[in-house]
Image (cartoon, helix red, strand yellow):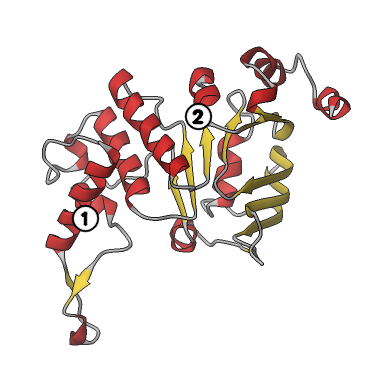
Amino acid sequence: MMSDVILETRGLTKHYGGVHALEGADFTLSRGEHVAIMGDNGAGKSTFVRQITGVEQRTRGEIIFDGKPVHFGGPLEAREAGIETVFQTLALADDLDVPDNLFLGRERTKWDWLGPFRVLDYKAMREATLAGLEKTAVKIPNIRNTIRNMSGGQRQCVAIARTATFHSKLTIMDEPTAALGVQETAQVENIIRNLKEAGEPLILISHNMRQVMDLVDRIVVFRRGRIVANLKKEETDGQDVVAYITGAKTQAEYEGAA
């Protein structure tokens, strides 16, 4: 029988020498659920994502994804397993165009009967790129432009379109609208709503309280490397969340209330 839980971490911990960036993170995400991770700068949010996606190797703890313990050696392994991620750094190749970035590491080929030799199917990748951009309502005037020649907003939209183009078991977005204008932010939020309608689970890291309260089912608050609150959206408000972020409310108070 398939578990309702798509992702679980048990005691997930990351130390950088004497710095405890993440300590004992117990986290679950159900299939189809959208969860926001919030916290101040340095709270451990991005560190948590880097452990899940294999960007860094955890100090200790377990990660169970789609019912199986996993230990990804890098982001490509996580992607192959079904985790699509938009990192704050975007992870785009500046000297490549839009199709090459969308298919980086999973290029489509033709004439595979040639044995070890492969020919890239540029036509198929361009068509899939245009379909992906249309699906996400992202407007890029010329997909043959290199990323280097695009605005910050366009770059962010390419990274998000790459994530939304491929069917995934889990999507993670780390501050996806931080560098975007109002119109581009609305596009990204529509992508997130479409993922929800399609039943695809999402982890959203965001400082935008309005966005979080509009888009997710649950809010997990990190403070000083630890999870200090796990709140259902309908049972909390922005003021309550901020109290946990700033330390005005503590983990002990949350556990006492529970």
Residue receiving disc 2 = 215
Whether residue 210 sits left or right of residue 231 in the image: it is left
The spot of residue 97 in percent (x, y) is 18, 48
- Quadrant hosting residue 138: top left
- Residue plotted at (44% across, 63% down): 80
- Residue 128: numbered disc: 1
Report the front residue among 197 and 130: 197
Quadrant including the C terminus: top right
Q: Is residue 75 above or below residue 257?
A: below
Q: Earlier in the sequence, mark 1 or mark 2?
A: 1
Callout 2: SS: helix
Locate residue 146, reporting x and y percent.
17, 43
The amino acid type found where label 2 is placed reads Leu
Neighbourhood count class around disc 1 (C-alpha, 10 Å): few under 14, some 14–19, many 20 upward? some
Q: Secondary structure at mark 1?
A: helix
Q: Position of residue 86 (x, y in %)?
A: 42, 42
The quarter of the displayed image where residue 195 is located: top left
Pointers 1 and 2 in contact (CB under 8 A)? no
Is label 1 or label 2 in front?
Answer: 2
Q: Mark 1: which amino acid? A: Ala
The reply, left or right, for residue 25 in relation to residue 34 is right
The picture places residue 24, in percent across and down from the top left corner, at 76, 44
Q: Is residue 96 visible?
A: no
